[in-house]
Image: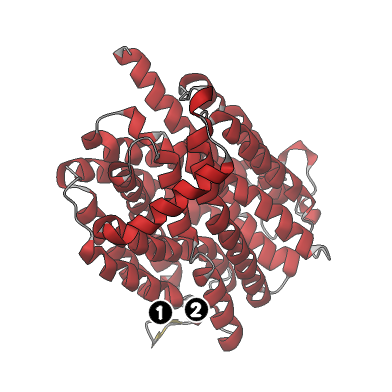
Amino acid sequence: MTKTENSRKIWGWMWYDWAAQPFNTLMITFIFAPYFTSAVVGDPVAGQSLWGVMTGIVGLILAISAPIMGAYADNIGPRKPWMLFFSALYVFGCMALWWAVPGSTAIVLILCVFAIGYLGMELSQVFVNAMLPDLGPSKTLGRISANGWAFGYIGGILTLFIMLLFLGENDKGVTLLGQAPILGLDPEMREGTRAVGPLTALWYLIFIIPFFMWVPDRKIERKDRVGIGVAMSQLKTTIASLPKNISLGAFLLSSMFYRDALIGIFAFGGIFASGVLEWDTQQLGIFGIVASFGAIVFTFIGGFFDQRFGSKPVITYSVLILIALSVIIIGTSRTSFMGVPLAEDSTLPDRIFMVCGAILGGAGGVLQASSRAMMARQAEPGRMTEAFGIYALSGKATAFLAPSSIALVTYLTQNQRLGLTPVIVLFLIGLCLLFWVDPKDDV
């Protein structure tokens, strides 16, 4: 393969991150989730609890399905047909959220449709991540992975600009430009904000094309293919062997907890700002832009650190930063900071949350990119999709813990700030388990 062909293959792979990142940016964190709790449900506390239950159920489904699909895919060959199927789920789930009208009585249906898109996005990542080792030497995987995350964040920030400038209306019914949403969308029915679903779907449909065109799919001879029974047996053997591989087992357990905590704080960050700090859609959008800029810069730099020092130190420091940020966020309210009362009209909580958002986006991006690279280095060649299926399992086996515990603590305390405390515990568990991870394959 020529240098140009290899470069195009890497760029094609990174275009997936560009195409899919708006789901995390717009749907999970900054636009749709806060809109669902504040406008569709109309009660931030009840909305946060419902959202937690939904994401917990999705996590449980992913924990069961991802490793099975990965093991089977490793035995039947091409990965792109799977990508087409999960992409269809992604697009359908996003597009259908146009009908999530304010005050809707079909809350369960809306959550189910969102869950379909969520599953499509998460399961497609299993197959995309499995392609990472084919993109370059082991030493470069951390940087390639980080560049992909950073590139994705740029796509996310551009879609946020589109939402803020042309679609997302504030309480006065106008966008950040001071005009009504484009295309004659009705601000009273929140059609500008509801357009976030179709926008996310259309963005993916357009920008996933380079991935399918430029990234070569692997092939397995038909005679080498095996059925689901054999694939399940191989998966069982692989999982059973994990206790003998202390480093890999410890990494999977560690990432299981710290990625669950990260998903929790990302999923509920916008909901928190909407309910606790009383931010509207435009303020949340600006917050998202700040966080995305931080993510772009820090994730790109993190790739160089990963290539120079290895993944383990990068992961460790990222988790420490996220623990500190979680404490600060929980200690921030409209009227106080870390227990110190503030003036009624103080803007300090807004500024603190903005800064935390920038650092949070950066640390989260670096953590995910380096974790993906570490998994690619430690996985067994030829069983890469299975390995990333298990990696998805490790990220989702306890994925119900963060959202479910947030939902439970929020319900018991009737306090959104206290509801986020479980993420600190999960980060700490993940940090402790990193002690047994051997970074010998990092560099």
Residue 276 point in image, percent of width and height? 55, 74
Q: Tell me: 59 left or right of 358.
A: right
Amino acid, disc 1 = Gly
Which is nearer the eye, 329 or 209? 209
Q: Dot 2 corresponds to which residue? A: 417
Residue drawn at (34%, 28%) of the image: 135
For residue 85, side relative to residue 422 (left or right):
right
Local packing at callout 1 (Cα closer than 10 Å; few below 14, some 14-19, many 20+) is: some
State the image quarter where residue 252 is shown. bottom left
Of residues 364 and 391, the one drawn nearer to the viewer in this rendering = 391
Mark 2 and mark 1 in contact? Answer it, CB < 8 Å. Answer: yes
Disc on the earlier residue, 2 or 1: 1
Q: Residue at x 38, y 35 (%)?
A: 382
**In this view, which residue lies farthest toward the right?**
105
Which residue in the structure is indicated by mark 1?
Answer: 331
Along the viewing direction, whichever of 236 and 49 lies nearer the viewer = 236
Q: Amino acid at mark 2?
A: Arg
Give coordinates of residue 288: x percent, y percent. 49, 53
Horizontal and vertical percent for residue 229? 56, 45
Which residue is painted at 21% across and 66% down in the image?
435
